Image (spheres, grey):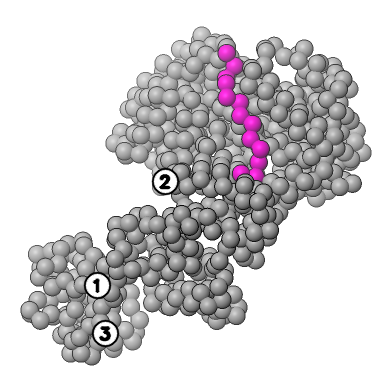
Amino acid sequence: MKSFFTPHQEKLLNKLNIQNWFDLLLHLPVRYEDRTKITDIQDLKDNAFSQVVGKVIDVNIVFRGKRNLVVQLEDGYGDQISLRYMHFYPNQKAQFEIGKYVLAAGNIRKNLITTEIIHPETTVFKAQEVVLPESFTPIYSVTSGLGQKNIYRLINKALEFASSQKLLNFEILNNKSKTDGVNLLESLYAIHQPNKNCDLKKLNSFSTIFHQHLKYAELLSQQLYLKLSKDEFKNQKSKIFSLKNNNLKEDIFKCLPFNLTESQEQVIQEIESDMSSGKAMHRLLQGDVGSGKTIVAIIVSTLILNNEYQVAFMAPTEILANQHFKIIKELFQSTDVRVELLTGSIKGRKRNEIIDDIESGKIDYVIGTHALFQDNIYFKKLGLCIIDEQHRFGVKQRLDLMSKGKKDGHQPHLLMMSATPIPRTLSMSYFADLEVSTLSKLPKDRVPIVTKLVRDSRRKELMQILKNELDNDNQIYWVCPLVEESEKLTLSDAVNTYEEFISFIPKEMVGIIHGRMKDQEKDEVMSKYLQKKIKLLVATTVIEVGVDVPNASFMVIEHAERMGLSQLHQLRGRVGRGAKKSTCILIFKENLSELAKQRLKIIYENQDGFLIAENDLKIRGPGEMIGTRQSGVPGLRIANLVEDADLVKEVSDYSGNAIKSNKPAAHRFVEFWFQDKNYLRI
């Protein structure tokens, strides 16, 4: 980059996340404008983009609360328009000399008195003749100090550089180039310098054949990146864990008060097959809320323990880590397996003893939070890393944990669990480096949860109704979006809601839990809730994932219109875990937006997490659904997983074969696309 840009340009481009000349070429126009014609001032329409030419007849700095620069133009018909600048440089006034001609472009503001353009783009001419572009003008996102004209010049320089050096010819794109009739360089030229015969609507919807070709190339780079990473991981050796004489597995089965579903049994076979192959496993376990992912993870861990290796189970929160610890400790209580918990709240001598016993191998099964991948923790023989709620952990955190078990060239196995189902296009793109196992069925004894929509105006009434449910030995979650009252947001908060409830319900029956509480306090509250000492728990979304209280049969979610579909589905899944009929009540504000209505309709009508996840992807896009996984996985700047689902499928089908047929070409393409970025992080 240093040789291509000046230091000053480099500094400005970095603000736009542009690191090199190829990043600059991928900085596509956000829209295109038709500046090939001029509109007479008398024909201008309000709020329409237009271009006018006029002679400067007046220039003034006026005060309208603050200083404004106003330039008055007049066209050949005597009609006038004002160019108004609310932010301007001291010498800007001098550019607009009386008698000079100005070409001005921008959105028109028109009323009965004036016609004006705020902060137009302008070109000043001495004579009346104006040279107009022959085709549509690309408009880019810019930064202070680097305007449209400068960035356009730099992009043209990059295009000429790529063309002269023949840097964009990739054999891995040959088949696509033949099909589309264009190559990568031609596509970039056509996008940055559109032909006058292009369809403006297609340009602005990014649906030209040139945009499609570029989207394909970007998706292919991502797919190859991940699949090459997958190959790299699969080539790493792991200990061959014998499937024979797994008495621990039989002991666990005897403790279970239920039978596994066919789906669970199939997934267990897939995972055990991986772990007995001698190749490192890199697998994602997904399934709907309540499909039994945790018990699958516990059962497959017996294979590791039976071969006298250690298991590390990492959860995103102390509440969840504590819950897993209690379940796992109880299941292994009649065996010789030593199970321990390591979280941030465990301090002093006890913490040091646990760390020492992990290193010496005295602890077989450790459950914990982020504390597990701290520098001072070492495992004697780590055979399996289980990561729950994988979207909350970045690639670096996952690799830090796994590196603790890498010994003698052997890599520990990795099993990641997803909180909610992952949409198919997301699985094919951002998760292409993983093998994916799916729990497709819920346990047969699961009673469907009744979902109800209640207006906010009935909130007080609902509180009284639920008081009666407490007398029937039911337990209730009441979820608020905030911990404390906010001046900016008129939302119900947990603290005030708790105070409301204890004004008419005995205080000892009501608990509160939120993210600002100490971990020990949260554990005490959850323990009382599990023991039914607390009947009504007021909470924030800290209880969104994993928390399992079988007796809880009512879930109330305030301001449900503000939450995403997957989050609502997760919260709803905190009830319906026992034999009781369960209800989820979604409280919403009046005057909903169309998007909020759409979300509530979907969650009200559906309990299928896979369908809900697909809809969530359409509404929110991949960003929030992927979570922290984005750090370390190449994102998409051009393609859209929802709109370009067919392209995702096409690329997914092609990329695996491309690696098999010409792996060096795949590496060259990925290395170029990501330039100096280290794309193989395994």
Give the image location of residue 120, x and y in percent.
27, 73
Identify the residue at the far top of this view: 472
Magenta includes 442? yes
Residue bearing mark 2? 643
SS type, badge 2: loop
Q: As drawn, is 629 to the left or to the right of 372?
A: left
SS type, badge 3: strand
Magenta includes 472? no
N-terminal-most mark, 1 or 3:
1
| Residue 619 found in image quarter | top left
Residue kind at label 2, given as amino acid type = Glu
Q: Please rate how many residues cluster around mark 3, counting C-alpha atoms within 10 Å: few if below 14, some from 14 to 19, many from 20.
A: some
Q: Please rate how many residues cluster around mark 1, counting C-alpha atoms within 10 Å: few if below 14, some from 14 to 19, many from 20.
A: some
| Residue 381 appears in the picture as rendered | yes
Q: Please rate how many residues cluster around mark 2, counting C-alpha atoms within 10 Å: few if below 14, some from 14 to 19, many from 20.
A: few
Tell me the chief SS of the magenta region. Answer: loop
| Residue at x-position 48% and y-position 63% | 183
| Residue 511 found in image quarter | top right
Residue bearing mark 1? 36
The residues tagged by marks 2 and 1 sit, at their Cα atoms, a distance apart of: 30 Å
The residues tagged by marks 2 and 3 sit, at their Cα atoms, a distance apart of: 42 Å
Residue kind at label 3, given as amino acid type = Val
Residue bearing mark 3? 124
| Residue at x-position 43% and y-position 59% | 181
